[in-house]
Image: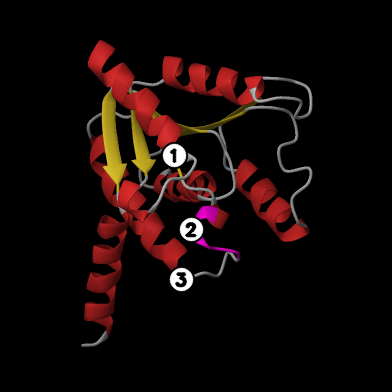
């Protein structure tokens, strides 16, 4: 696999409203654990929609991994121009900091948001340009925006052998439990 789409929940879908939330650390550890073996097997690009939540935390992980794997590249493909325009200042600052570590940035539409078609076009492009998806999603935890990515990925898997890799809330909880265990010693 050369190109991987990484996405998942938006921060608010996880009830995360601050970059200081302790859960982000465990989500990033889970992402790192899935990405490292893929990079060692030849992964070249991580591509994300760049929405506030798992997408941007994945970007932070990739930026950190680039120190160990300089061949790794990171791309954000947004649905429309200036997606952060209406975000609060702290989120905007975080987004702009992440953008500094991105190797390629583009938006599918050069206009501001004006319809769901922009998301549809973005998603079609993301699936067309990638060989697989790493999705942070857990059906048991309730539906959210990743549900649509899962459905598309599984259809593409059936038709073309597209790779589907997931991280569930149980995976993240187990990393948190292990981390807590080690800090108690």
- Disc with the residue nearer the chain's start (2 vs 1): 2
Q: Is residue 61 magenta-colored?
A: no
Residue 14, numbered label: 2
Q: Which residues are magenta?
A: 13-17
User: Residue 154 bears which disc, if any?
Assistant: none
Disc 1 packing (10 Å; few <14; some 14–19; many ≥20): some
Dot 2 falls on a residue whose secondary structure is helix
Residue 36 picture location, percent across and down: 28, 44
Circles 3 and 2 in contact, beta carbons < 8 Å:
no
Q: Marks 1 and 3: CB-CB under 8 Å? A: no
Nearest the viewer among 44 and 108 is: 108
Mark 1 vs mark 3: in front: 1
- Residue 145, compared with residue 173, is above or below; it is above
Q: Is residue 71 left or right of residue 42?
A: right
Q: For the C terminus, give its image quadrant.
A: bottom left
Q: Which residue bears the numbered disc 3?
A: 22
Q: Quadrant of residue 12?
A: bottom right
């Amino acid at each position: 696999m050369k190109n991987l789409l990484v996405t998942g929940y938006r921060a608010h879908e996880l009830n995360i409203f601050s970059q200081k939330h302790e859960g982000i650390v465990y989500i990033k550890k889970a992402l790192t654990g899935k990405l490292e073996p893929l990079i060692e097997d030849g992964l070249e690009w991580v591509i994300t929609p760049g929405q506030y939540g798992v997408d941007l935390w994945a970007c932070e992980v990739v930026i950190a991994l680039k120190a160990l794997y300089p061949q790794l590249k990171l791309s954000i493909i947004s649905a429309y121009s200036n997606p952060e325009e209406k975000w609060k200042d702290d989120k905007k600052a975080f987004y702009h900091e992440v953008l500094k570590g991105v190797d390629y940035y583009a938006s599918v539409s050069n206009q501001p948001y004006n319809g769901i078609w922009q998301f549809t076009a973005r998603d079609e492009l993301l699936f067309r340009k990638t060989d697989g998806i790493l999705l942070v999603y857990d059906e048991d935890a309730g539906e959210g925006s990743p549900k649509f990515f899962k459905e598309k990925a599984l259809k593409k898997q059936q038709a073309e052998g597209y790779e589907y890799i997931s991280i569930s809330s149980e995976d993240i909880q187990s990393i948190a439990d292990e981390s807590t265990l080690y800090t108690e010693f």
